[in-house]
Image: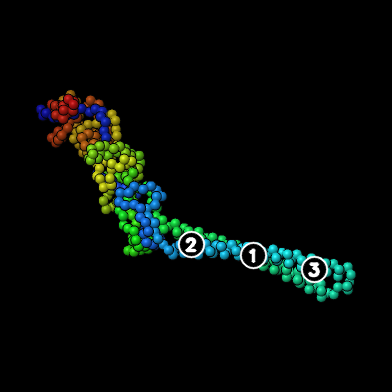
Amino acid sequence: MPTVPVAVVGPATLQNNLVLSAEFEAFQDVDVMAKIAGYVKEIRVDIGSHVKQGEILAILEVPEIADDVAKANAGVAAAEANVVTAQAAIQRAEAGANIAHLSYQRINDVSTKNKGLVPQQDVDVAQSRDMEAVAQLASARSALKAAQQSKLAADSEYARTQAMMQYATIRAPFTGVVTKRYANTGSMIQAGISSQTQSMPVVRLAQNDLLRLTLPVPVTDVAEVKDGQLVDINISNPPRTIHGKIARYADSVLMATRTMDTQIDVPNKDGSLVPGMYAEVHLHLADRPNALSVPVDAIDGLGTSVEQAYVVRSGVVHVVQVATGLQTPSRIEVLSGLQVGDAVVVGRHSGLSDGEKVEAKQASYENESNRS
């Protein structure tokens, strides 16, 4: 009678953990460019400088922009003077129109009441002067509108030059640390809208109070990735473990590597983590507490459409069809076919047949697990 090693079917906590290596990256990392071209008049930061959002990094000297501002300011003053002149012209035109209309009414009334007292030519001349005064008033009002539109255009040009002047002061787009300084006092900085061969950044700024970890999750585990999933991040220097969550994932597999980029946000308020450091990330894909399970080598045909286990009952082998679930490196979840307390043959199943009599002996690793 052959002796076979067996393991007892029982509940266990199964976890599917994916271990990946990743490199810390700054949450944001940009080259700060200049909007306009000019010479560096003053630069206030250097490598390692910590800056707040909106803080001044450098000031450019752009004389032509200052001239444009002065010219635009003069244009605004001229436009305002034109508006005042047009308003005065309207007042004169209104006064002229009023007197011309009164004169025409009076001479027309006299001519109507006393026929022949006033020559018709005088009446016609008064009427034409009245109509001419009305036309002059309309023209004056039109000139006022044109002056007001010119004033708006002058204000817009002045605002544009003021905005361009503001660009001469380069500010930090976000809170971070300067990781590289490209320019010095007196350096000529091209506008950032120029071609990359001509333009030169002022500094490079990185946001280090929050870091990213990008994990290349294999395509076989992509379906298990979800937002908010817990991860353990092991850091070697100094040795410690940080708990985090999945912040976002690409939801698309890269065809070249058959992986999906998955990102974790790691707070770094104390600055103990530096971009470029490596970390070992344990991604908890699944967790089954008190799951009915057996050792992996107890299942024959694992991963095929026909999975079966060899159960020993009263010294006789019985081949049982089973369905499996979550698999870990050492154990596998049994969904159907087995019950708690069943003794299943582990290891090689070749040479065993249904109904064969055997002597069951508990597997050595089962004894070790029981002692532990």
Residue displayed at 26% across by 37% down: 241
Q: Which mark is residue 104?
A: 3
Image quarter where the C terminus lies is: top left
Asked if residue 5 lies left or right of residue 306, the reply is: left
Label 3 CA crowd tier, 10 Å (few <14, some 14–19, many 20+): many
Residue displayed at 11% across by 28% down: 3
> Can residue 121 be seen in this snapshot?
yes
* Tag 2 and tag 1, C-beta contact below 8 Å: no
Label 1 CA crowd tier, 10 Å (few <14, some 14–19, many 20+): many
First in sequence, mark 2 or 1: give its number.
2
* Tag 2 and tag 3, C-beta contact below 8 Å: no
First in sequence, mark 3 or 1: give its number.
1
Image quarter where the N terminus lies is: top left
First in sequence, mark 2 or 3: give its number.
2
Q: Amino acid at mark 3?
A: Tyr
Q: Position of residue 334 (x, y in %)?
A: 26, 32
Q: Amino acid at mark 2?
A: Val
Cα distance, mark 2 to mark 3? 52 Å
Residue that carries the numbered disc 2 in the rendered image: 69
Foreground: disc 2 or disc 3: 2
Asked if residue 116 lies left or right of residue 41, the reply is: right
Asked if residue 335 lies left or right of residue 367, the reply is: right
Residue extending farthest left: 1
Q: Amino acid at mark 1?
A: Ala
- Determine which quarter of the picture holds residue 299: top left
Residue that carries the numbered disc 1 in the rendered image: 86
